[in-house]
Image (tube, grey):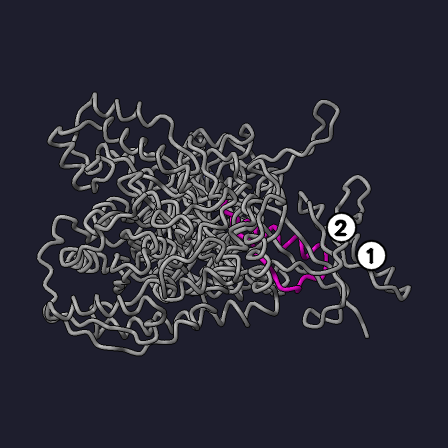
Amino acid sequence: MRLNQLTVIEARAGLKAKKFSVVELATACLVQIKAVDKKLHAFLTLNDRILDQAKKLDQSGDDGRPLWGIPFAIKDNFLTEGLRTTASAKVLDNFVPQYSATVYKKLIEAGALCLGKTNMDAWAHGSSTETSDYGSTLNPWNTKYLPGGSSGGSAAAVAADMCLFGIGSETAGSVRQPAAWCGVTGFKPTYGRVSRYGVVAMASSTDSPGPLTKTVADAALITKIIAGHDVYDATTSPRPVEINPNSLQGENLKGKIIALPKEYLIGEASGLILEAVKVFESAGAQVKPVTLMDPQFTIAVYTIIQRCEVSSNLARYDGIRFGHDRSSFSYEAKNRSLLGAFSLSTGYFDQYYKKAQQVRTMIIDEFDRLFKQFDFYLAPISPGPALPLGASKTSAMFGELQDVLVEPSSIAGLTGLSVPCGIISGLPIGLQITGAQFDEQKILQVGHWYQQQTKWHLEKPKL
Amino acid sequence: MKLQPVIGLEIHVELKTKTGMFCGCSADHFGKAPNTNTCPVCLGLPGALPVPNHQAIDWAIMIGLALDCRVNLESSFDRKHYFYPDLPKGYQISQYDDPFCQAGKLSLASGKIIRINRVHLEEDTAKMQHQVIDGQKMTLVDFNRSGVPLVEIVTEPDIASGEEAKEFLKKLRDIIRSLGVSDCDMEKGSMRLEPNISWSESPEKLNNYKVEIKNLNSFRFAQQGIDFELKRQKELLDQGKTPVQETRGYNPQKRATFSQRVKETSADYRYFPDPDIPPIVLTREYVENLRTKLPQLPEALANEMVNKFHLSLSTAQLLSKDQLKLAYFNQYKNQVEPLELANLIVNKKIDLDQPPPTKAASRAVDLNIIDQVLKENADAVAKYRTGKTSVIGFLVGQVMRLTGGKVDPKQVQDKLLKALQVRNLQG
Ligand SMILES: [Zn+2]
């Protein structure tokens, strides 16, 4: 096994035991990037100082920080001081930030090394990475297919072992869906659990940063580090972080009551989800079918709220600052801005935005009731495996339709995990394990337990 | 149909908090080198988020309470969208549906009540400077002021003349200064006025046009501008014409307003609740606690000083609205005879960095002692009231005893007589 194939936990153990150096570990990742990224196009910008930074760590020695010496990739909508940040949008083509996102800062402070910035749908507007102004990332399992999105670059980078872990952000499925399509683990913590400060805003009321990793155990380790109240983000929760990556073991599924929403069992993925359900049942859990609001309704709610917030959040790119004028906006961003501005206009606000918020409250209430009776629910992340390149161009609502099964949990700000649970025609499928707000530890324990019972997360694409 | 002058005021006041409305930059931006007082938040950089300043919220609510407003226990910040180079986010964070305070009032000396529509909080914009650089006309933007807490006070259109407007504005300024939350310095722009003027049937039934005057940098100019505008509009109306709905500037040299911008359509600001800021939820107790922090407002304080220290109304008014002079008065009023101290401060304009001249200090009569003696000797006071004025000698003796004889008996007698007179009037 090459060093770049290690999980974070394995690599930390190796560094601690001095089996290899930070420079060797970082070099293994760089060699892999060189070998495969011409084909996959996961990275937009590489950190050309990483070997110097690695050397410095080797010289000063392992100080025990939880991510000391661990190379990672980060989605290009996280601001990185001194390192170009574009959010895959030409408007920000030469934007070099003066400050860093809280998530990035926390990772660097924990000793991690940034390999570079990964590709995404421009402004995170999409679920394919195909709307990137810099061209699509390709799926490592089959380069004729999409990696999913918007965090497609980070998902592909993890799946192809170009890094030890990746950071993404999700508005509705943008971490979990590319994780599912690329066969890696993706975790969306509760809205407000991880700071949005320094993340180029998409839809402020649902944006949630999260990790893309090789295992659930790694996801727990990373989330523990990036989570917590941030004085720079008024929407972060002051609750203490109750994630403990060292006590994921020993989860007992006996007596757990699991919901299986009937409305979510659509598409060819549902067969593999029912297989996964059997794993839970054989451990003594009770899995009960439930009826939830048809997720189709969430599409309308999510689309309106997200377009409104997008139109407002993109207003700062007014052509006066950041070097490029508004003609650099691509089709998708213009389309969303116009729809959002329309929905917020006098006379339409009540009809669209207000009504959408009312239905949003109904969705939140429905989940509140559900989690009074059930520990969590299981569902597919996406109705099927990755779609072929070009698919996003066939439908104006491509993203919303692909993310239909995760949108309700995003709209309600829940805790959501995606773990690999099978393969269809050579492409991975993701299982959704979703729990109540701030149930991170429980969901991570369940996910870790599932990965102890199954081997799907160990399957790798043949590059 | 008889038309009357109908004037409403929009007043912006910069709060003198330590930091910005939503960031940690200094709110004291005046006179600093351009763009030296900025951060990602007030520059509107990608990814930056606003975190509300609770001191500013408290102060906005205190202004509302001082203006007799209702405080909304649930309020929110909203995004107000418009495009302008001094607005880096493309929207201003303001308040729309649920401002902190609504439905207040302020009364004029005549007893006329001016209703307050709302008091809300928002962020100030950057400042534009139009310059010629290397022969080219340029507009430069200074972001030092961007994000400074700004309170907006909106009146109902209850004002009927330039003079009423001036009186209202002075009174409002004195109240806000007495709260210690803003300097209200017109020259530095920490208080800005925008009157809306029309001739209408009534404040409830407005005409189909209104004219806004901007950039008025003194109360006098506000008064003059309003009066000029009323006259100009009246002449047009008398000719059967309707004045154009527009924004006008004021030229103090010509004592005239001039057209600046004609507003043909009303802007659609596409307000919606700012998703970056959770709604602000207050408890009744919290608001009541803020109310206890309100100092006595200038008007009530002046009345009290007239009663307690026998100052003239004009002296008391001058003292009550000047925080420095008032603090000085309170510091020394037990050592120097208050009436004399007030005159030294207001008329002699003594140096407030020095203690009052000692000659005054030695003759001081503490009015609290006068009050005490009158209270403790209710029998003697009753006798005095029935005509036995000779008991005054006894009362003077009591004061001399309590002060250890350190005061002028003649002055003590004057004070006693005056106090007894006031009590007679009140009794
Ligand atoms: Zn600032």
The residue that mark 2 highlights is B261
Q: Position of residue B211 (x, y in %)?
A: 75, 57
The image quadrant that residue A429 belongs to is bottom left
Stretch in magenta: B147-176
The residue that mark 1 highlights is B231
Q: Residue B347, can we see it?
A: yes
Nearer to the camera, A393 or B245? A393
Mark 1 sits near ligand 1, with its Cβ under 8 Å away: no
Nearer to the camera, B323 or A103? A103
The image quadrant that residue B117 belongs to is bottom right
Instruction: Confirm whether circles 2 and 1 share one chain.
Output: yes
The image quadrant that residue A206 belongs to is bottom left
Pinpoint the chain carrying mark 2.
Answer: B
Disc 1 residue type?
Lys
Task: Tell me: B231 left or right of B40.
Answer: right
Q: Is residue B148 magenta?
A: yes
Q: Are marks 2 and 1 in contact (CB under 8 Å)?
A: no
Q: Badge 1: few (under 14), some or many (20 or more) residues near its Cα, within 10 Å?
A: some
Identify the secondary structure beneath mark 2: strand
Residue at 79% over, 57% down: B230
Nearer to the camera, A6 or B279? A6
